[in-house]
Image (cartoon, grey):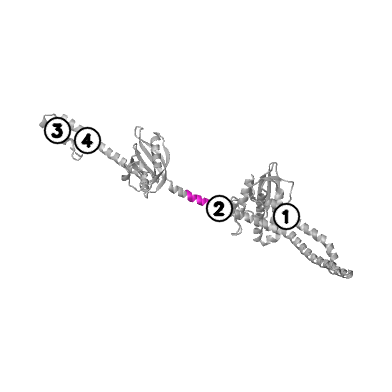
Amino acid sequence: MTSAQRPSSASGLGEAAAGAARLEGVDESTWLDVIHKMDEVYSQLVADEVALEEKNAELEQQQQFIFSLLTAMSDVLVACNEQGLIEETNAALCELVGRSDAQLRGMPVASLMADDIGVERLKSVMETVAARRGAVIEADLRDAQGQPVPVDFNCTPRLNSGGQRVGHVFVGRPMGEIKRAYHQLREAHEALKRTQQQLLHSEKMASLGRLVAGVAHELNNPISFVLGNVHALQRYTERLRSYLDGVHAALPAPEQARLRAKLRIDHLLADLPSLMEGTLEGAQRTADIVQGLKRFSAIDREERERVDLNAVVERAIHWVSKGTAPRFDVHWQAGPPCTVLGSAGQLLQVLMNLIQNAYDAAVGDKAGDRSAVKAERPALWIDLTAGEHQVTLHLRDNGPGIAPEHLSRIFDPFFTTKPVGTGTGLGLSISYGIVEQHGGQLTVENAPSGGAQFHLQLPRAA
């Protein structure tokens, strides 16, 4: 009976009660109490029905929420009972193994494994997993094409309301995609390392090119001198041979005298000592240059030795001035020996880089202002401050300085303000790394008097 079918007023109840009383001989008040009780019971039933419908709706929403979560999971999920029979799966597992949820329900979870090893691991973890703790296993599932797929499973116990274990839940992530992604990442990393090594080699070759330019200029004079003397000695040898041929032919004394005068033998004999001395001096100068170069040529050498920083600075100034910066005024006065511990070749690379950059900055500024070119040549001031525990070199040029927005990026790899094709942007970055490897620090700022100023700090050798 619905609410529309119930008596709508007290008069209706009264009439019903009166009729019942006449039929049954029961008084009216008794029937009214019965009817009121029935009405209360019915109202409670209606209220319970409404609450039940609300609970059913809420339960349906929760089930839909759980289903949406299971569907959205990229990891595979399978729940089984204590006997290992599948009770619940998710869409990721169904898609992986190529079977529907209905087909999987009731199957042994071990049937999903691709080999006996996976089955044994599964059984072992189901037998040994604690009531409230999980375990991790690696096993291969058989996919829809029958191929093994490595999966990293996390196995946790499934408990009932009383805290007793009633099954297990396996959540796993297929490792095939991850392994492929890792393989691609490793290949990309190796390619990046090769590119980095090529760029570093390119920058080192650029530094070597500047060094070679200076060496070539330095060697040119003594070698040219030696070559000139050798050509003169070759001509003198021909004249001596002609004279000796006449002597051996037993020419008369007057003929020998005329031949001696014609070949200028006396002048030749007087000139020979100076020619030999000049040739030896040129050869020794060449040997000295090569020997000095050998001390600084091992740019990649990792050994640490005691190095006089004054000698490194002088050598760097020498090679840059003789090579790529012949019209560069470098103001430097060597002081007492100042020893640091490091690689002479690597420190030479740093100093040559800083000096070359100073020249490029100064020339670039003057190239844009012709009046400035006439007024002032590119210049660099180098000062050395020696403390008890560290040495600091200050290098200040008369260029335009560094833009404020570039100061924080000046040591970043590949950052350069030079035109395309004139710089790799790695010189200062490599120099910064070399100084750090030596336990020092390389910083830069704009000098108050103008230009850029680099500070190179190195620990003193004990």
**How far across and how far down the image is residue 103, in percent?**
31, 45
Describe residue 378's horizontal placement relative to residue 233 as left or right.
Answer: left
Q: Please tell me whether mark 1 sits on a helix, a strand or a loop.
A: helix
Comparing 187 with 88, the one in front is 187
User: Element at badge 3?
Assistant: helix
Q: What's under tag 2, amino acid-wise?
A: Arg
Seen in the image, is 242 located left or right of residue 93? right
How far separated are the C-alphas under marks 1 and 2?
35 Å
Q: Quadrant of the C terminus?
A: top right
Q: CA distance from mark 3 to mark 1?
A: 134 Å
**Residue 47 to residue 246: above or below:** above
Q: Secondary structure at mark 4?
A: helix
Are the residues tagged 4 and 1 within 8 Å (C-beta)? no
Report x, y in % for residue 115.
Answer: 39, 44
Name the residue carrying label 3: 17
- Disc number at residue 289? 1
Q: Earlier in the sequence, mark 2 or mark 4?
A: 4
Question: Where's residue 198, x and y in %?
Answer: 58, 54
